[in-house]
Amino acid sequence: MGRPFNLEVSESAEYLSKSLKKARTAFEKERLQMLWWVKTGQVSQHKELSQRLGRDDSTVTRWLQRYRQGGLENLLLKKTSPGAVAKIQGEVLQRLIERLRSPQGFSSYGEIVEWLKQECNTEVKYKTVYRVVRYQLKAKLKIPRPVSKQQDEKAVNLFKKTFPTPLPACKIS
């Protein structure tokens, strides 16, 4: 027989049960289920725990070690890769925001790419500029143009000439 299985679960069984019901991912559910089994005394051996979870002994050992070191928060912490460094950041991003807010603005995303190349010495792809401006900054290049009353009246008159009489209403019986 291996070494004795001893784990002190600091959270209450009720708290673990509620957390288990609120858990949205299988990642969280598995780990909370493991702690709940230990807390309620349903599992008393490491091997039994790994069999119930359907996980290798080394995986369960790693999970228990994470719990012992940092508690529930550390056990449920999901590591994510940092990703690439943003191409438009810091001072360049601030200058872009100021220029987008200015009355002159930009007429196209291609113009922004050229502006970044000339003014900020930054090579950025069109797709990246579009994603940053449109989704991160939530800015739109198309500015609503003022419409004169005269143009409005012309459009209404043209519509009336095109469709002189209203369509008859259909009766449904």
Image (spheres, rainbow, N blue to C red):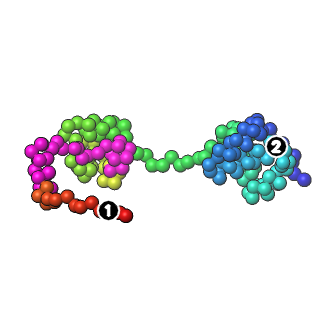
Residue ID at (74%, 57%): 55
Q: Secondary structure at mark 2?
A: loop
Give the quarter of the image for residue 118.
Answer: top left
Residue 117: give its label. Answer: none
Q: Nearer the viewer, residue 8 or 39?
A: 39
**Residue type indicated by callout 1:** Lys
Image x and y of residue 67, in percent: 72, 41
What segment is highlighted magenta in the picture?
A: 130-159
Q: Is residue 140 magenta?
A: yes
Per the image, the residue denoted by label 2 is 40
**How far separated are the C-alphas under marks 2 and 1?**
69 Å
Per the image, the residue denoted by label 1 is 171
Main structural element of the magenta stretch: helix, strand or loop? helix
Count of marks overlaid on the render: 2
70 lies above or below 45:
above
Q: Secondary structure at mark 1?
A: loop
Circle 2 or circle 1, nearest the eye: 1
Image x and y of residue 173, in percent: 37, 64
Q: Nearer the viewer, residue 166 or 100?
A: 166
Residue ID at (65%, 44%): 22
